[in-house]
Image (spheres, rainbow, N blue to C red):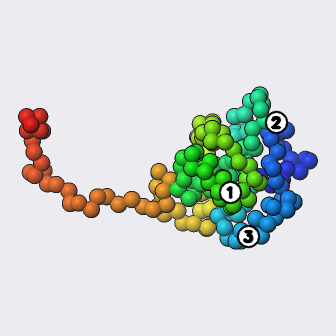
C-alpha cells in the first residue's frame, strides 16, 4: 500500500522514511494539481491490492536503509505504463516529473538505486504488473485485447516493403563468391 505509514503499518523500520507524507504541504499542493483520473492515482489505488511480501523479502536489512520498495515499485509501474523501461530514464524522470514526486512522496533514488531495484525485483515487477492487469480486466477497466512484450504502448507493424519471392533471392552460395 502506498500511503504515509501509520504507527501500526507493517512496513519494516529498516527502510528510510520518504521526505513527504500525505500531510506535507508540498505533497498536498501536488495532490491538488493532479487530475482525478491521472495514471499516478490509478497506480496508487491499485497498489493497495498487491501482495508485496515477496518484494520486501528481497531486502536483507543490512547496510544503509533503502528507499521503501512499495514507493519505488509504484514509480516503476508508472514508468512501464508510459513505455519507459530503462532505469536511467526512471532516474531522470524522478528529477523532473511532479506526478512521480507525488507518487513516491518525494523520494529521488540515485541512478544506481534504480538499476539495483531492477536487478533485485525484475521478476517480481513483471508478476505484480500482471496482477494489476488481471484486476483491471476483472473490474472491466480494460479489455486487454492486445499487448506488447517490450513495454511499448504502440503496436509495431512489419516493414512496409513487400517480401521478396523465393525466386528473387540469390542462392546462398552466390553470396560467398562475391
Q: Position of residue 156 (x, y in %)?
A: 39, 59
Between label 2 and label 3, give the one nearer the viewer: 3
Mark drawn on residue 92: none
Q: Residue at x 82, y 36 (%)?
A: 14
Q: Residue at x 90, y 47 (%)?
A: 8
Graded by Cα atoms within 10 Å as few (under 14), some (14 to 19) or many (20 or more), the crowding at tag 3 reads few
Q: Which residue is mark 3?
A: 33
Residue 69 position by quadrant: top right
Between label 2 and label 1, give the one nearer the viewer: 1
Of residues 7 and 15, the one drawn nearer to the viewer in this rendering: 15
Task: Please identify the quadrant where the C terminus is shown.
Answer: top left
Of pointers 2 and 1, the one earlier in the residue sequence: 2
Q: Which residue is mark 1?
A: 100
User: Is residue 46 in view from this perspective?
Assistant: no
Residue 38 position by quadrant: bottom right
Secondary element type, mark 1: helix
Of pointers 1 and 3, the one earlier in the residue sequence: 3
Secondary element type, mark 2: loop
As measured in the structure, the alpha-carbon distance from the residue carrying label 2 to the one carrying label 1 is 23 Å
Of residues 164 and 30, the one drawn nearer to the viewer in this rendering: 30
Mark drawn on residue 14: 2
Q: Of all residues shown, which one is farthest toward the top?
A: 62
As measured in the structure, the alpha-carbon distance from the residue carrying label 1 to the one carrying label 3 is 13 Å
Amino acid at each position: 500500500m502506498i500511503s504515509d505509514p501509520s504507527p501500526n503499518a507493517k512496513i519494516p523500520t529498516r527502510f528510510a522514511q520518504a521526505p513527504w507524507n500525505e500531510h506535507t504541504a508540498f505533497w498536498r499542493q501536488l495532490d491538488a494539481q493532479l487530475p482525478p483520473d491521472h495514471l499516478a492515482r490509478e497506480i496508487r489505488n491499485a497498489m493497495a491490492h498487491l501482495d508485496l511480501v515477496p518484494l520486501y523479502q528481497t531486502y536483507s536489512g543490512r547496510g544503509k536503509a533503502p528507499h521503501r520498495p512499495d514507493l519505488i515499485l509504484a514509480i516503476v509501474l508508472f514508468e512501464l505504463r508510459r513505455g519507459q523501461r530503462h532505469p536511467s530514464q526512471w532516474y531522470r524522470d524522478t528529477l523532473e516529473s511532479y506526478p512521480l514526486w507525488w507518487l513516491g512522496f518525494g523520494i529521488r533514488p540515485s541512478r544506481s538505486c534504480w538499476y539495483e531495484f531492477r536487478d533485485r525485483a525484475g521478476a517480481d515487477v513483471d508478476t505484480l504488473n500482471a496482477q494489476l492487469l488481471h484486476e483491471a480486466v476483472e473490474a472491466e477497466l480494460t479489455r486487454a485485447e492486445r499487448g506488447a512484450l517490450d513495454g511499448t504502448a504502440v503496436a509495431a507493424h512489419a516493414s512496409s516493403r513487400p517480401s521478396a519471392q523465393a525466386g528473387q533471392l540469390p542462392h546462398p552460395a552466390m553470396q560467398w563468391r562475391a
